[in-house]
Amino acid sequence: MINCVLIIVMNLIYFVCNRFPKHIIEFSGPNNVFATIVNLLYFIMYFMVLIIAFSKSKTIFSEFVFSPFEKFVKRFEILRLAGLIVLQIAIDLIVFYLTSFDIMQLYILDTITFVQWILIYLICANKETNFFKKLMPCLLTSLAIILIFAASMLLNDLIVHAYPFEIGKYSSDANLSNVQINREFLFEIKSFLLDTLLGISLIVSHFLVNKEIKQKEGAIVIFGRIVVIFIIAFPMLSFKYLLLPYQCIKNTTVYSPNMVYSDSPANFYAWGKEYTATRFDEKSEPKAYYNLTKHKIVHRQKEIKSFFSSIDNLKFKAFLTDNISYELYGNEAICYLDDLEARVVLFKELHKTEKDETLLKITENIIENQNWEAFEYAAEYIYKYNPQKIEDMLVSLSSNEFTNEQLSSLNEFKINPEYIQKISKKILD
């Protein structure tokens, strides 16, 4: 129990003070050498907790954790500690080359974490207490950690595909700043959970197999020790914040922007809440670490649609086509009146929206206006219900046959022509 709490608290301290995946070597940022030393101090404490748990089958609160009758190197498990530090540094060097958030590289990062925990246990555990040498405990533990690993792989896939259309879309990273930081934030949360759950599963399995050496402790004693662990955590956090605030979480805020009104007679308006988190950057100034806004589109004081977006400053823009008045809320939603009934359709939900003649005319107008931000959504909807209207255009774009006007327009939107070509092929398939 205590060792599980220690793993959770130690990982929380790291998450608050640094970026996952965990590492000793700081390859970027100010004071790299000092930052690496601070990380090394953290890992020495972290690995000593694991050595006590797996090698001694005890906790930091146990009596005679380190035998006074053993030599210094054996008593404090210096060789095991050195082995764990060398393992972590080797992993740092491998991860250094996995800098992007490509799905395959994310799978590799998870595999590294999975293998690292197995190696940590094999380095720390004694032959007599190693549960991998016992068939049933080995099978059950292997099943548990494989399920955790599989769940992490699934989360990778879900996070990557939460932003399917942004990947490779823009020629400028500025268009994707919030998308990128939000994805990184979600991956770090997932990495924290994976690392923590794998550690807990191994600790619990080791504890259950070695019942004969576990110590019986009352609930009050356990609660008191947990309180002590959290009390000790505060000086550790303060040490990092005072000496090296770089990468530490500065704050989290919830902000309600001003309402946004449309200029058309339809009288749509929107408001929402912006959720942000910041970390200290190289100059010890706050830098966005997470930024997500919940938008609510309202008509005549009735909420029509709410959704989350990485884009915060969305505006309404009115259009008219075939006597149909509609508005775009940024490039996130289409707002219009259908027989005086307010309708809001999110672009990302167009592919599963039923056929609607008004919506068809609106999406056709979006294509005619060369709104490349919304191209993939509108084109897919038109091709689904009125393919002859757009098929020739998709064939030309899929063959990389862009007109000069289209290329100029794409350049204004800072959207890669290769992306439009790829999307056109996907729609035709």
Image (spheres, grey):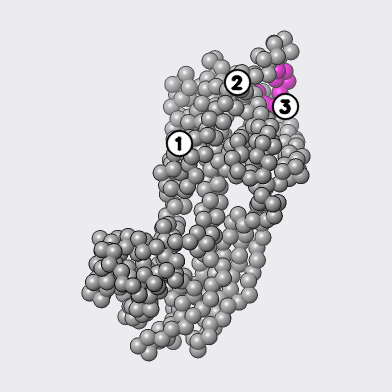
Tell me which amino acid carries mark 3: Phe
**Classed neighbour count for the residue bearing mark 2: other residues with Cα under 10 Å, few (<14), some (14–19), many (≥20):** many
Relative placement, left or right, of 115 versus 239 is left
Question: Which residues, given as a range, are shown in magenta?
Answer: 58-66
- Quadrant housing residue 429: bottom left
Q: What residue sits right under mark 3 in the picture?
A: 61
Q: Is residue 267 above or below residue 394?
A: below
Q: Secondary structure at mark 2?
A: helix
Relative placement, left or right, of 274 versus 229 is left
Tell me which amino acid carries mark 1: Thr
- Quadrant housing residue 270: bottom right
Expressed as whole percent of the image width and height from the top left, the position of residue 248 reads 67, 47
Q: Are marks 2 and 1 in contact (CB under 8 Å)?
A: no
**Classed neighbour count for the residue bearing mark 1: other residues with Cα under 10 Å, few (<14), some (14–19), many (≥20):** some
Q: Secondary structure at mark 1?
A: helix
- Of badges 2 and 3, the one in the foreground is 2
Q: For marks 1 and 3, give the CA distance.
A: 33 Å
Q: Earlier in the sequence, mark 2 or mark 3?
A: 3
Q: What residue sits right under mark 2 in the picture?
A: 80
Give the number of callouts: 3
